[in-house]
Amino acid sequence: MTGEDSQSPYIGEHGKSTKQKHDSRTQTMPFLRLSRRAIAVAVATISLMILSVFAVWHFETPIFDVSPYVWVSSLTTGASLRAYDGETTEAFPLARSTPVGDKYLIGVGKADITGPVVEINFGGYASLPQKGTGLRQRIYARTFIIGDVSKPDNRIAYIILDTQSGDAAVRIGILEGVAALGSDYAMYGASNIAVTGTHQHSGPGAWFNYLLPQITSLGFSQQSYQAIVTGALLSIQRAHESLTEGYLDIGMTNITDGNLSRSLYAYMANPAEERAQYHASTDTTMTLVRLQRASDLKNIGVLSWYPVHGTSMLENNTHVTGDNKGVAAYLFEKKMASDANAAPGFVAGFSQANVGDTTPNVLGAWCDDGSGQMCSYENSTCADGKSESCHGRGPEFFKLDLGVSSCYEMGRRQYAGALDIYNNLSISSIPVVGTSVKSYHFYQNMSFFQFQLPNGSTVQTCPAALGYSFAAGTTDGPGAFDFTQADSGSPNASPLWAVVSNLLRTPTDEQTLCQHPKPILLDVGEMSEPYDWSPNIVDMQALRVGQLIIIISPSEATTMSGRRWRNAVHSEAASTIFKGSVDPVVVLGGPANVYAHYCATPEEYGIQRYEAASTLYGPWELPAYINLTLKNLAYLAPDATGAPPVGPTPPDNRQTSLSFISSVVFDGEPIDRTFGDCTSQPSTSYIVGDVINATFVGANPRNNLRLEGTFAAVEQLDSTGSWVQVRDDNDWSLVYTWERTDTILGHSSVVISWESEISAEAGTYRLRYYGDSKSLLGTITGFSGVSNGFAITT
């Protein structure tokens, strides 16, 4: 059976592009026709400076409405957790003694992907000043492998990276790495490996495949990229090695205070009758899958989907974290370490969903101009008509701590929701049945791709382009100058940037018409010097396990886009794959495989707020995604054979990417000091809840990422007189901060801060620092330093 057998009304003529991809040089200025590579590099360098000023390729915005949308249970998320304390008082039910679902092969794995935590621009906000200065929480790859017991080569590997997205360079590296692992891993490949990101905005960047997101990071960092790929591969290996027979259960709960619509004005442009089908302007349902091994009925992991942006940590935060989903995973895995029903090595995956127009800043968007007013409903501006002072507020914004407390709270709410599902699976769950594990993947060029809408009319998508409102950002990271959301671009909203836009690339009439009503600011899909600025080729992928279907989205789908996409797949799968035998459960994961910015509905596209301006492929992007998904859905049928055509190969820019990122030259130590010396000691005593600091003679942490290790530790004196490590880089409460104190002499300092938890035991502790110094000859040498002991009392 092939994907062409389906007869869904969304499927029309699966046509090819009516035109060849335009040569991006045909519309450029005459001086670009000189020495192409040299001039292209010069233009790109100038662009790095120009676009860095207002660089805003991913910002966020909150507005209103968090009414309930209940499926299985209604969750009140306030409760039994205290700040920086992962303990609850709920009793856990016994694991199900007689599972009723079918058996699958199941395996989970987790590995460290923390790249350079200093001197590298963060990925997400695209803010030039946001360079790392340290670490609050290590970031991870979590892999979930599920296979067909009777056909063990039929598997899926769902990877969740604590990164801004799953992108092309990283995916290519992972696929190459898996292929190099040999015949034992031959069943894994492009079709069944999905690389998703939690969409956090507080991790090292500079690993993207395309030029545009590289601009604020000053290019590509091999070290940042390799940390992600190496960790992802290790998580796959660990999941593969843990494979065993087991059962899957699905549960759902409602988290009404876990997100907010940041573009309600655009959402309201969707048809009233469609909006009336839902109780909220965001999806508030968390869907969770439990993996339970058959041998002893121990639970080995959970995999969940819930939409909320990873922007709790603010744009001026410079410490690496996994943001709210990183907190949720940390709390859940910590809880499972003491759960009698959980196996050692339990992995908790908190995957992103239709995140596009959601925000964790659930108190709304307010003007920081002293007026005390909320930002405007239509375009998120303040009294001066500009967006710069309009910022979203998280639940703990009044603490003015760069979003740290709000981030923890928003992660706690997701953790509490997942725990609610987990605790009730024994009495309320959907067993996964059917044994079949299927997947498909292909590449699609979105440039002038023609297809038919359900009403029979022919439409097309466009080469990638970004509109004026893209540069306005949103309330989690507003733009600069006079850009605003819902910007029509006319008569000439920003004359200066119109000149800049045309200098880089003048869109053709065909592209302008195709993208209408978007006023094009950056015609990135038709800019390929010195290499492609943004993707025109996207990954189309879907996975199936029993009645669970996972749509893998290359773009950040808005709330209503995700609903339409899921509903279309649900309807088609119910009638063609399952034929009424079972009700499919459809979820959407992303942004995955390639970062293709946003996916707004055609109605939202007409409003041209940030999400629509960032919908790369024009007003028909969502219908195209649905068309392509349904066209190939038959490949997920139990008796399906073959695979869709692979499609055009996307560019691999890893070896050609520019980089203006300087390397570490050397580390020096003061004349009267050595590396690791503690220059500022803690006090002798504290009470729980206090912050304990120690300062050390440091070295650049880029010398050694210490993957699977730690830069900082808290040690406790036990009853035998031995020092035992009780906190490390994984703990939210332990913060590592690095500062260059003398560039010429190579001096630096490190501050280790322990924000002691309410749950901390009384006792004697000390802080330890692990570092690595680089000599002028390039030799890297490890060292450690330790503070004096101090007492903590309750």
Image (spheres, rainbow, N blue to C red):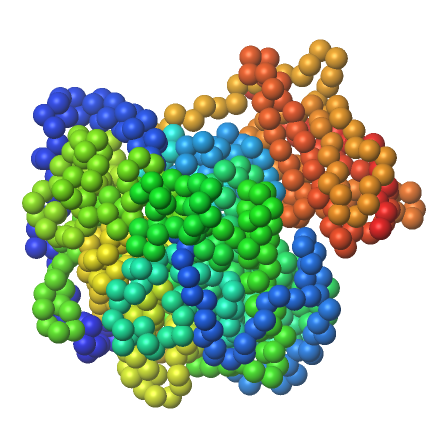
The percent coordinates of residue 200 (x first, y second) are 47, 49
Quadrant of residue 242 in the image?
Answer: bottom right
Above/below status of 498 relative to 308:
above
Please identify the residue farthest to the right as the structure is shown: 720
Please identify the residue farthest to the bottom as the structure is shown: 581
Residue at the image point whose x is 65% and y is 66% from the top? 79
The percent coordinates of residue 334 (x first, y second) are 67, 58
Above/below status of 643 relative to 596:
below
Quadrant of residue 540 in the image?
Answer: bottom left
Q: Nearer the viewer, residue 172 or 336?
A: 336
Above/below status of 664 relative to 745:
below
Left or right of residue 31: residue 129: right
The percent coordinates of residue 231 (x first, y second) are 52, 47
- Work out whether residue 371 can be spotted: yes
- Work out whether residue 105 can be spotted: no
Residue at the image point whose x is 91% and y is 43% from the top? 721
The percent coordinates of residue 268 (x first, y second) are 30, 65
Residue at the image point whose x is 40% and y is 57% from the top? 63
Q: Nearer the viewer, residue 316 or 709?
A: 316
Report the label total: 0
Residue at the image point whose x is 55% and y is 85% from the top? 100
Q: Nearer the viewer, residue 243 or 714?
A: 714
Q: Quadrant of the N terminus?
A: bottom left
